[in-house]
């Protein structure tokens, strides 16, 4: 049976996650049986958060090709927030289409002054300030957001999925991504991953879409999620392709057409036998109303939406509107992937394999076991620095 002390600690953590608990209560150190030092709040107001960061290039294990480009690396910036002996970790990952760079991220981060805040539990105040520094710079904002959530979770002594009240056992399988390539390379990649994962994600949108799928089907009958990355331009051809894909065991379609063709996408979605998810058509919470009815669901990515705080709001709003939800990612270390995975017990699809595609991960965090997302019962994001 839970003791009164444990009950109060758990209730406080849950209240922070839902925004119901004022930070003055935590700052006063009034949790039964805990000193203010244990919750890491300095009674004299001398503790301050210190932000630091450095560039870090992610190295891909294979050439990664989508409908519009290929690459072997992804620029990244690693971030940490130190507070009273505790460190929270975050990162900004910037694939080419995001339109952000190492220089732009570091220029933004130099403007962030967290030392003006003596209480890290003021998550909403802090991240509202960060978001207001510049328009855009979403990856840089996400890096601060992730590090702050990691820090606060560690101060509370709980992982964020628990603070949000989620059941780790409900986390779904994650897709494993196979980029556009020759039949020989696609066959090799499929053989490497077919026995490890329960669902694959295949990039399409060029002139070899059917060849890609047929090659994979020679090897495995695993369910497949398809991401066209805006590659289909004609709505009738897009629908014909989706109907063919349905016959091949595909279970969902992501961003079939250019985001500018919203009316065409809406027509495709209304006639599609498969659910259609928005990716390039959505970035932040404020974008959801404009695409309602044009898609079955949304793909939330921390680097596009500014981080965990906004992602939680997007998930909640989309559910209220009857939309389905998936969590996606860039190529990232286990820091960014594990941050996104904290929301995974509440979603329909997970595409959280970005850390599995690189050869120089800095962390150990969320793991994939038998194809399923496995969350650690450890404070904050539950990361271990390698």
Image (cartoon, rainbow, N blue to C red):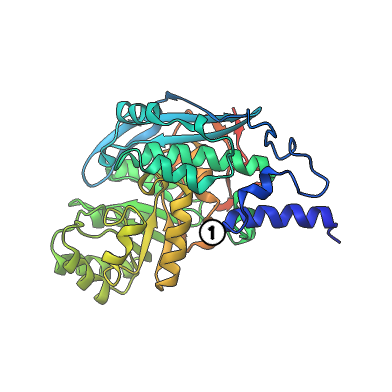
Can you give x and y, in whole percent of width and height, for residue 94 in the image? 34, 36
Q: Nearer the viewer, residue 72 or 117?
A: 117
**Badge 1: residue crowd in 10 Å (few <14, some 14–19, many ≥20):** many
Can you give x and y, in whole percent of width and height, for residue 57 in the image? 39, 26
Is residue 291 left or right of 175 when viewed as pictured?
left
Q: Can residue 219 be seen in this view?
A: no
Which image quadrant for residue 185? top left
Q: Quadrant of the C terminus?
A: top right
Can you give x and y, in whole percent of width and height, for residue 65 in the image? 28, 41
In the figure, 105 relative to 208: above or below? above
Q: Is residue 29 visible?
A: yes
Q: Which residue is drawn at 45% across and 44% down?
A: 127
Q: Residue at x 39, y 26 (%)?
A: 110
Query: Circle 1 is placed at which residue position?
Result: 172
Can you give x and y, in whole percent of width and height, for residue 283 in the image? 32, 52
Which image quadrant for residue 242? bottom left
Is residue 216 left or right of 32 when viewed as pictured?
left
Q: Which of 317 and 115 is in front in this view?
A: 115
Is residue 4 left or right of 340 when viewed as pictured?
right
């Amino acid at each position: 049976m839970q003791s009164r002390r444990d009950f109060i600690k758990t209730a406080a953590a849950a209240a922070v996650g839902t925004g119901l608990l004022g930070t003055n209560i935590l700052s006063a150190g009034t949790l039964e049986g805990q000193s203010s030092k244990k919750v890491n709040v300095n009674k004299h107001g001398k503790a301050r958060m210190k932000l630091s960061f450095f560039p870090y290039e992610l190295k891909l294990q294979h050439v990664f090709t989508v409908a519009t480009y290929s690459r072997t690396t992804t620029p990244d910036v690693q971030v940490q927030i130190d507070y009273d002996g505790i460190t929270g970790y975050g990162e900004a990952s910037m694939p080419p289409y995001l339109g952000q760079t190492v220089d732009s991220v570091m220029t933004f981060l130099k403007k962030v002054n967290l030392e003006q805040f003596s209480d890290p539990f003021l998550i909403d105040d802090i991240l509202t300030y960060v978001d207001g520094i510049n328009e855009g710079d979403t990856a840089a904002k996400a890096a601060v957001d992730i590090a702050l959530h990691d820090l606060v979770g560690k101060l509370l002594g709980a992982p964020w999925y628990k603070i949000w009240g989620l059941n780790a056992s409900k986390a779904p399988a994650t897709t494993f991504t196979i980029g556009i390539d020759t039949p020989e390379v696609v066959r090799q990649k499929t053989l490497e991953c077919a026995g490890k994962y329960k669902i694959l994600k295949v990039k399409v949108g060029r002139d070899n879409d059917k060849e890609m799928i047929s090659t994979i089907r020679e090897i495995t009958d695993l369910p497949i999620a398809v991401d066209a990355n805006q590659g289909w331009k004609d709505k009738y051809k897009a629908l014909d392709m989706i109907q063919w894909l349905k016959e091949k065991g595909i279970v969902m379609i992501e961003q079939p057409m250019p985001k500018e063709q919203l009316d065409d996408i809406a027509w495709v979605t209304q006639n599609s036998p498969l659910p259609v998810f928005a990716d390039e058509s959505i970035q932040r919470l404020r974008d959801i109303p404009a695409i309602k009815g044009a898609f079955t669901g949304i793909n939330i990515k921390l680097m596009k939406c500014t981080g965990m705080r906004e992602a939680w709001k997007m998930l909640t709003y989309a559910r209220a509107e009857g939309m389905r939800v998936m969590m996606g990612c860039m190529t990232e270390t286990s820091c960014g992937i594990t941050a996104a995975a904290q929301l995974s017990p509440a979603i329909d699809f997970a595409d959280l394999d970005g850390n599995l595609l690189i050869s120089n991960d800095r962390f150990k965090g969320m793991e994939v076991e038998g194809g399923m997302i496995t969350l650690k019962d450890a404070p904050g994001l539950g990361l271990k620095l390698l």
